[in-house]
Image (spheres, rainbow, N blue to C red):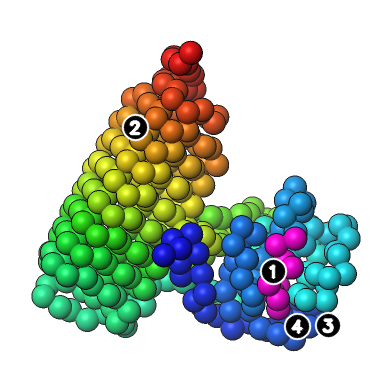
Amino acid sequence: MDHETMFSEIEYFNVNVNEYDKSKSHFVVRPSSLKYPRSNAVMFIMEKYLKMADCFDAVECCLIFWPKGVDVPQNIKEKHAVCPVEDPHLAYCQFFKDHKLTNCADVNDLILKNGYYISSNVQIGKNAAIFPYVVLNGNIIIGDNVYIGAGTKIIGNVYIGNNVVIKENSVLGADGLSTDRNSEGQAVTMPQYGGLIIQDNVIIGANTTIARGAIDNTIICSGCKIDNSVYISHNAYIGENVFMCGESHTFGSVTIGKNTQVSGNAAIRNGLSIGENCLIGAGAMVTRNVKDNMIVSGNPAHEIFFPK
C-alpha cells in the first residue's frame, strides 16, 4: 500500500477554470502538490521551486497559480490552465475562500452505534475496541486489534494500521495552521485535504493531537510511541520506532528519522529534518536540521555530542 499517495484520488469539489484562464474550460476537483501531482487538480508553484515544474508533464487539466513575470513553458500552457499571480501561495489559498470550500466534517453523516458516533465511510477491522464518546467521521480505515479510548475524535482521511493503541481524548486528523494573509492583513486559510497515516504497532497517548496533511499525508511510521499531550502538526513524517515524550511539539512539515527520541517539552520548528538515532533533550527548541546520531539540547538547541 502506497501510504504517501493514499486518498489522493478523492474528488472534493468541481470548479471550472475558465475564470482563471479564458483559454480553458475544464474542471478541477482536488488539490495536489508538486511532489505528488494529480490530474484535474488546483496547484501552485513558487519561483524558488520552478525546478520542479517538470511535474506538470505527468498530469493534465490542472489549474496552476504561476509566479507573475516568469515565462510559462509552452507544454504547460497547452495542458493546463495557468494563472500568473504575484503570490501563488496566497492565490491558491484565495481560491478556496472564493469558492467557499472548507473541507469540514459532515455532521449529517453520523449515526450513534454502541455509544460512539460513526460515519458511513468508516471501515473497521477485527477485534477493535472502541469506547463510548468516540467520533469516527470521514474516510477512515481501521485495522485489526485497534484500541480507541473514550472521547477520541478521528476526522477526515485517516488510515490506522494493525495493533494500534489510541488513548483517551486524543484528536487525529485535526487541521493544521495553513494560513496566509492578504494585503489587508486578513487571514486566508488553506483547507486541509491531506490525510493521516498511522502504521502498525503505534501507541498514542491521551490528549494528543496529530494534524492531517495540508495536501499530502502526515505519516506516523510503525513502532512509534507517542506520549500524552503531544502535538504533531500537518505534513509531518515520523520515522519507525520514534519516541515522543509528553508536551513535545513538531510544527509543520517536520521529518524525524527512525529510532530518534524527542524528550518532554521539546519543540521542533517547521520544515526541519531530524536524523536517525538522535536524542532531542528536554525543553530543547530546535531551529535547524539535526544530523544522524546527534544529541542536542538547549534553546536554541545545540549539539552536545557528535560521534567520531
Residue 60 belongs to magenta span: yes
Q: Which mark is residue 261?
A: 2
Query: Number of numbered discs present?
Result: 4
Label 1, on which residue? 58
- In three-dimensional space, the C-alpha distance between marks 1 and 2, rounded to whole angstroms, equals 38 Å
Is 285 on the left-hand or right-hand side of 48?
Answer: left
- In three-dimensional space, the C-alpha distance between marks 2 and 3, rounded to whole angstroms, equals 53 Å
Q: Is residue 192 visible?
A: no
Q: Is residue 69 visible?
A: yes
Neighbourhood count class around disc 1 (C-alpha, 10 Å): few under 14, some 14–19, many 20 upward: few
Is 169 above or below relative to 113?
Answer: above
- In three-dimensional space, the C-alpha distance between marks 2 and 4, rounded to whole angstroms, equals 50 Å
Tell me which amino acid carries mark 1.
Answer: Ala
Label 3, on which residue? 23
Neighbourhood count class around disc 4 (C-alpha, 10 Å): few under 14, some 14–19, many 20 upward: some
Q: Which mark is residue 18?
A: 4
Tell me which amino acid carries mark 3.
Answer: Ser
N-terminal label among 1 and 4: 4
- Select label 2 or label 3 by which is in front: 2
